[in-house]
Amino acid sequence: MARTYLVVIDDSAEARVALRFAARRAAKTGGAVEVLAVVQPQDFVQWGGVQAAIEEEQRLRIEASVAASVGEIVDAAGIKPEIVVREGDPVTVVRAYVGTRDDIAALVLGAAPAGKPGALVADFTGNDAGKLPCPLMIIPGSLTDDQLEHLS
């Protein structure tokens, strides 16, 4: 079973840095990368087709972001990240998703270079950090490509 690095991604620069780290790490260890995007639920969607269209739009946006972030790594290593889109509160969704998977080698999160940590970093490094079923890797969003290459 391949070691899977699970990256939670959004539109932030630090999430793209975390994805680049995970892709480099997977390439060096013969692992895989899985990208989890969490869509916040809509307040009210009258028709299911509208919700499906929103989720598909999110998936396409995330796929474009993944391609832009790790395209050359994917090409060089032959790694094609799997993209999973879930709806709900990000902390709840990530906890539930990680809890159902025994092939996840690490949960990889990006940390903002300045300001307060995001909700996921704050939650997963808080009181419940020891309850995760896998290691947590927090990648500083300020790392350069050379630093990522060296660290991965």
Image (cartoon, helix red, strand yellow):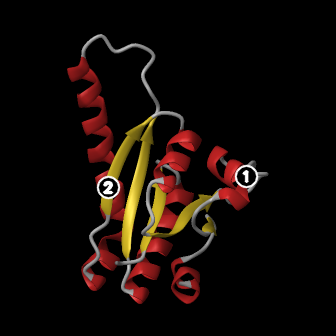
Question: Could you tell me which residue is drawn at 50 percent across and 42 percent down?
Answer: 93
Res 23 → quadrant:
bottom left
Foreground label between 1 and 2: 1
Q: Residue at x 56, y 89 (%)?
A: 150
User: Could you say which quadrant of the image residue 41 lies in?
Assistant: top left
Residue for point 54% across, 63% down: 107
Q: Position of residue 138 (x, y in %)?
A: 64, 66
Side of 66 where 108 appears, left or right: right
Mark 1, other Cα within 10 Å: few <14 / some 14–19 / many ≥20: few
- The answer to whether 42 appears left or right of 136 in the picture is left
Residue type (three-letter) at the residue carrying disc 2: Ile
Q: CA distance from mark 1 to mark 2?
A: 26 Å
Q: Is residue 142 above or below residue 9?
A: below
- Sequence-wise first label, 1 or 2: 2
Residue matched to label 1: 128
Query: Given the image, on which type of amino acid does mark 1 rest?
Result: Asp
Q: Is residue 127 left or right of residue 118?
A: right
Q: Looking at this view, name the residue that lies furthest to the left.
A: 49
Where's residue 91, x and y in %? Answer: 58, 43
Query: If the image is split into quadrants, where does the N terminus sit?
Result: bottom left
Outermost residue on the right side: it is 127
Total residue callouts: 2
| SS type, badge 2 | strand
Residue furthest top in the image: 46
Question: Callout 2 environment at 10 Å: few (<14), some (14 to 19), or many (20+)?
Answer: some
Identify the mark at residue 83; answer none if there is no mark.
Answer: 2
Q: Looking at the image, which is closer to me, 113 or 94?
A: 94
